[in-house]
Image: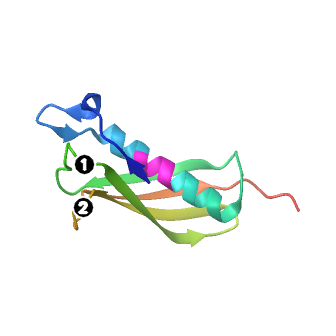
Amino acid sequence: MRHTIGAEELRPGGTVSGPVMMAVVDVALYVAILGEIGLEALSVTTSLNLNFLRKPSATRDIIGVCKLLKLGKRLAVREVSIYSEGEPEPVAHAVGTYSIPPRKL
């Protein structure tokens, strides 16, 4: 997941706002989970934890890299590492759980 940072998304001091990074995480989780289970519109976030690790660049896109931790019948758990484009160290790390509705057979 890639997001280009706009001036309106910066906090004083030139850092990317937390809500912007949280949105990137949530969209990355949603897209990745639906990529695994198919279009289940009623899949919803049940838990989302975001740890800020270092200041992201205000002039580079942020990149969310998503990894599956667990995919069960009713819950999916993934993690997302967020990077400033071109930087090797993550600026944030998140773990999210989604509730999956019962599937019709």
**Mark carried by residue 60:** 1
Q: Is residue 86 left or right of residue 31?
A: left
Task: Name the spot of residue 22 as percent of width and height, x first.
Answer: 38, 45
CA neighbours of label 2 inside 10 A, class few (<14), some (14 to 19), many (20+): few
Q: Nearer the viewer, residue 42 or 62?
A: 62
Q: Residue at x 20, y 43 (%)?
A: 58
Quadrant in the rendering for residue 95: bottom left
Which residue is most to the right? 105
Q: Is residue 78 left or right of residue 92?
A: right
Please give the range of residues in magenta.
24-28
Asked whether, in this view, residue 89 is left or right of residue 102, the answer is: left
Amino acid, disc 2:
Gly
Residue at position x 30%, y 40% in the image: 5
Q: What residue is rendered at 17% in x and 55% in y?
A: 54
The quadrant holding residue 81 is bottom left
Residue 90 in which image quadrant:
bottom left
Asked if the residue under mark 1 is in contact with the one under mark 2, i.e. CB atoms within 8 Å, the reply is yes
Q: Residue, x 29% and y 55% (percent of image)? A: 51
